[in-house]
Amino acid sequence: MTTLDPTVVTTLDPTPVSAVGSAPPAEPHRLGRLGATDGLGPSSPTSPSSPSSPTSPTSPTSRHRQARRSRRGSSAEGRLTRASAIGLGVTLTWFSVLVLIPLAAVIGVAAAGGWANFWATITNEQTFAAIRLTLGAAAIVTVLNVVTGTAIAWVLVRDKFWGKSFLDVLIDIPFALPTIVAGLVLLSLYGPNGPLGVNIANTRIAVGLAFLFVTLPFVVRTVQPVLQELDRDVEEAAASLGASRATTFRRIVLPAITPAIAAGAALSFARGVSEYGSLVLLSGNLPYSTEVTSVRILSSLENDNRAGAAAVATVLLVVSLVVIVAIDVLQRRRVRRG
């Protein structure tokens, strides 16, 4: 029997004798690629679908990058451009010159007279009667304007009738007429020897009528465009489900127009408190009876009592500001509640 030399066997086949007949072992990197693509083994550490991959959308690194991008985007949106900064500066300057500085001057004059003079002025019997009449009449007129102004706006938007366009134009007449002309018109109609046979001149009713005349358009013109833009399909859907007209108005229409009503009411109250021209001829300006605060302020200025006039003006300013802010807060709360 012939014996083979081991060196010859090694030279002919480097594979060990125990591995003869079996497949050569696969390379580790090839196994990783096969497992990642064919599902035959664990995924590669560098696979995009791996949770630990740096480029995976769910990886911590990716989340941090997205957070940084969102922060940079939000800061860029909140940053003013040069044009916006110029516009904001012009707006604030103009508003300060026309509104803030004059109001601050009035408050400063009132404060210069001292607290004792301020309190003595507003607690004066004649002055207090004028303030009470003005605020009370303005509040009553505002409530009436909310009801009648909303009804007129509804008629102008929802109803069709002859003369509708003419009525729509008439609503703006108090805006166009000077207030002294409005007072003359009202005196000609409701004064002595008027064609209507009604004489209410020099009475508190005349004060309320003058307030109504000059403040009614505010509610109408704020509610009317909102009603025009209101979707009628929602109301028709509610009616098809069995809701009555009253329920539809209360649950659908009224919540939609409430912000506009509140805005009109605030403007109406502020306008009524500051009214002067239409009252000069109609109310008679009788102390303790028909004298309003605007006439009282003018009387103080004529008597060279600037501190007293500024004190009364400050009271009206504070009351008007409180009413407007309160209405705005209530309106925002209602909007949040839906």
Image (cartoon, grey):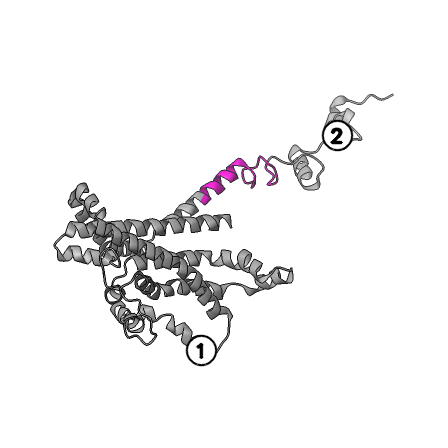
Which numbered tag is attached to residue 12?
Answer: 2
How many residues crowd mark 2 within 10 Å: few (<14), some (14–19), many (20+)? few
Which numbered tag is attached to residue 163?
Answer: 1
Q: Position of residue 307 (x, y in %)?
A: 16, 49
Residue 58 on the magenta segment: yes
The amino acid pointed to by label 1 is Gly
Residue 181 on the magenta segment: no
Query: Residue at coordinates 19% horizontally, 52% vertically from top-left?
Result: 309
Whether 259 is drawn above or below 64: the answer is below
**Badge 1 element:** loop
Q: What residue range appears in magenta?
A: 46-70
Question: How many numbered callouts?
Answer: 2
Q: Position of residue 29 (x, y in %)?
A: 64, 35
Whether 214 is drawn above or below 326: the answer is below
Residue 231 seen from this side:
yes
Residue 104 seen from this side:
no
Q: Quadrant of residue 47?
A: top right
Query: Residue at coordinates 54% horizontally, 63% vertically from top-left?
Result: 231
The amino acid pointed to by label 2 is Leu
Outermost residue on the left side: it is 304
